[in-house]
Image: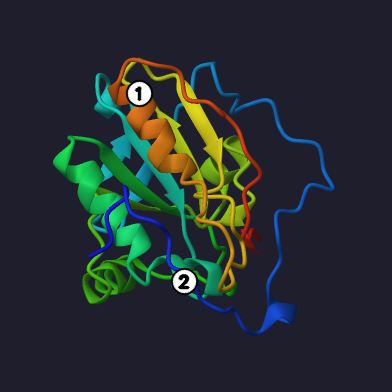
Amino acid sequence: MISRRSLTTAAGLGAASLLTLAAFAAEARADAVPGEAAPAFTGLTAAGETISLSDFAGQTVVLEWTNHGCPYVQRHYGGNMQGLQADAAEDGIVWIQVISSAPGEQGHVDGPTALSLNEDRSATVAHTILDPEGTIGRAYDARTTPHMYVIDGAGVLQYAGGIDDQPRPRDGDPAPTPYVTMALDALAAGETPDPAATMPYGCSVKYG
């Protein structure tokens, strides 16, 4: 298993016509701003529980927007994402997946399917929130899968953006800059993540 302190492995991506990098045609909403309070939310998990961000006061929280049909997500679930999740769990960090795909759109699943997907790929997450109406996704201006957010124990959004800086790594490329790892390490050291915001990449979130 690749840890969050390991480098992301390079892999090719196909079906480029079905993918999109971060779509920045519209201005970002002001709801989720690094350095300010993270948007509060309440959601229903794949296990049928209702959870709120406030339930995890005092704990670092990672939000991961995901879509199992997205090749970018599939690449990171080749081991990198699981390693990040496992290390986060060991450190007492609450890792929450959010699925904002609308019914009929790529990535939309019911609770049992979401749980089965995580079991099949050995994901280590505390919760998977189903957000088919896109309420939480829009509050965070989540644009891509993956799109990553790190929230500190005081409820302040400390990082928002890409998992790293290599959308399409190729042999010979420099090692990726592991933004999420950097943010978590900075918080563990009592420091402010730098950078606090980066450009996310991946498939567009399939809002209805």
Q: Which residue is mark 2?
A: 75
The residue type indicated by label 1 comes to Leu
The residue type indicated by label 2 comes to Arg
Residue 187: give its label.
Answer: 1
Residue 207 visible from this viewpoint: yes
Name the quadrant containing residue 17: bottom right
Q: Quadrant of the N terminus?
A: bottom left
Q: CA distance from mark 2 to mark 1?
A: 27 Å
- In the picture, measured across the screen, residue 54 lies left or right of residue 75, that is left
Residue depicted at 49% across the width and 45% down the height: 148
> SS class of the residue under badge 1?
helix
The colour scheme applied to this rendered structure is rainbow
Q: Is residue 174 above or below residue 60?
A: below
Front-most of 103 and 205?
Answer: 205
> SS class of the residue under badge 2?
helix
Front-most of 172 and 111?
Answer: 172
- In the picture, measured across the screen, residue 135 lies left or right of residue 191, that is right
Name the quadrant containing residue 202: bottom right
Q: Residues within 10 Å of mark 2 (few under 14, many from 20)?
A: some
